[in-house]
Image (tube, rainbow, N blue to C red):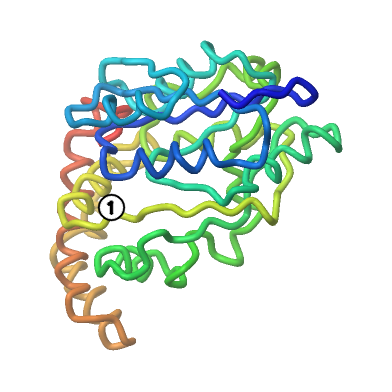
Amino acid sequence: MQEKTNVPLVSAIVPAYNEAAHIEMCLTSLKNQTYPRIEIICVDDGSTDTTKTIASLYADFVISLTHQGPAHARNTGANRAKGDILLFIDADTYLDTRYVTNITKPLLFHHKKAAYPIHEKVANTKNIWSRCFQIDNDLPMTERIRDDERGKSRKIRAIWKKEFLQTNGYTIGVGYGEDDVLASADAVPVMNALSYHYNPDTLYDVFLSARWMGRSKNIKRSLRQFYRYSLVHSLLESTRRILHGASPIFLVYKIVFDVGFTSGMLIKNQRHDYAK
């Protein structure tokens, strides 16, 4: 834990499920922040790989849970946190050294309740499946937030703990998109809090991510939805993208993603809140 007493303690909460490939970079970037007082809490959400072992080398505390999804993991970390400010960071993300300093400025100096960044960079821009993810979401190759969405999503990253507790935390059972549930908080955008997020970089990760999205409580099962992620639509959409300059391998990505999304919709009543 970084120590100085003239600024509020920030508790960085990192939920992680099978993130052995990224957790070290994430936690190292938290330890290298310019902000002087950070408590790092990793909440291992029932990982079956070496996530917990790696996290124990860098985090101040590692909390072990059975696999119940990121909403439950974030709430658990928040309840255990000692800091006045809570910082929620994804395990497949690493931060610019001034991220914590910049994201907490509105809270510390402008009396705001919460803050969210409006820039999120892609960490693995050269990976073909990451590039396909950007194309599929109509995003530029280096940014995960479109210009017309800045200031709309409001996925809160920093919030006073007392304010967080008044919201009752993240809603369990939502699934993908659970980090939008705090959007109603009095939050402000921050321009210069830069983070770098890894897109799915293997076909298996593409499938798992899509399955989780399809399983979300916010996704309604309907004939229209099943058509949208059907093989026919995959072929039509891929052809359109390829004609507009995408690599032919986008077809493979699209089929795998849509199969994953459809399988998620088929089992959505079983596990809304599980991560993948």
- 198, 266: nearer the viewer: 198
Quadrant of the image containing the N terminus = top right
Above or below: residue 224 compared with residue 215:
below
Residue at 67% from the left image edge and 25% from the top image edge: 85
Residue 9 at what x, y percent from top left? 68, 22
Above or below: residue 182 compared with residue 121:
above
Quadrant of the image containing the C terminus = top left
Give the total of numbered labels. Answer: 1
Element at badge 1? helix
Q: In which quarter of the image is residue 2?
A: top right
Above or below: residue 84 compared with residue 105:
above
Residue 191 at what x, y percent from top left? 69, 56
Within 10 Å of disc 1 (Cα), the crowding (few <14, some 14-19, many 20+) is: some
Residue 212 at what x, y percent from top left? 27, 40
Residue 263 at what x, y percent from top left? 16, 44
Q: In this view, does 217 lie to the left or right of 266?
A: right
Above or below: residue 214 compared with residue 162:
below
- 269, 27: nearer the viewer: 27
Q: In this view, does 91 lie to the left or right of 21?
A: right
Amino acid type of disc 1? Gln
From this viewpoint, which residue is outermost toward the right? Answer: 110
Residue at 30% from the left image edge and 21% from the top image edge: 68
- 106, 264: nearer the viewer: 106
Residue carrying label 1: 225
Residue at 64% from the left image edge and 34% from the top image edge: 158
Residue at 28% from the left image edge and 25% from the top image edge: 52
Q: In which quarter of the image is residue 119?
A: bottom right
Q: Is residue 90 left or right of residue 34?
A: left
